[in-house]
Amino acid sequence: MTKDFIKQSIDLVGHAILMNCTCETNQKINLCYTIGLKETYGTDEVCLVGLNPNSSMGLINYFVANHIDQLKKENYNKKLSEIFNFDTILLPVDENNKELFTNFDELSDNQDFEFVQLVVTDDKGKFIFEEGYNQDFDYCCEILGSVNISLL
């Protein structure tokens, strides 16, 4: 994806979505993330880990189009219902995971690294960090930040 294409996408819909597939220590991480939300809406960028790229792009686009108002720091680490047909939580991404976001600095003109991860529940309504989470669930993601369970 070129800088010109990203700029056109941001001008057209307010953001662009980039996809990375990172393989480290035999672990594959599908990562989709936005560029442009900070510029367009003044919010943190959004990422989604674990789903196939088409599903990730669809969920991110749906979230941005319909729930951008939820993207506030006071909603981070809180369970949000009714965004999708399942519970969601927004978790701040630790800066030490920045290397997973390849080309972010270059393609975002070196904007600050401020991301929130969209995390959804499994088919039984459990988050990956909760007891009873279905490890066989298709959407099994890695958490890129820390969870403040006391806020849930």
Image (cartoon, rainbow, N blue to C red):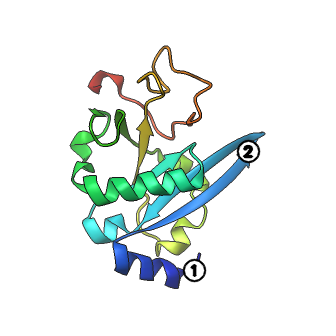
Whether 151 is drawn above or below 47: the answer is: above
SS label for mark 2:
strand
Residue 108 in percent (x, y) is at 47, 72
Q: Is residue 100 visible?
A: yes
Amino acid type shown at disc 1: Thr
In this view, the residue farthest toward the bottom is 4
Quadrant of the drawing holding the C terminus: top left
Q: Residue at x 44, y 33 (%)?
A: 146
Residue sitting nearer the eye, 28 or 87: 87
Q: Residue 95 bears which disc, if any?
A: none
User: Which is more foreground, mark 2 or mark 1?
Assistant: 1
Which residue has dot 1 on it?
A: 2
Which residue has dot 2 on it?
A: 24
Residue 71 in percent (x, y) is at 27, 51
User: How crowded is the residue under tag 2: few (<14 C-alpha within 10 Å), some, or many (20+)?
Assistant: few
Amino acid type shown at disc 2: Glu
User: How crowded is the residue under tag 1: few (<14 C-alpha within 10 Å), some, or many (20+)?
Assistant: few
Q: Is residue 135 left or right of residue 8?
A: right
Q: Count how many numbered circles sit on residues in the image.
A: 2
In this view, the residue farthest toward the right is 26
Q: Residue at x 49, y 48 (%)?
A: 48
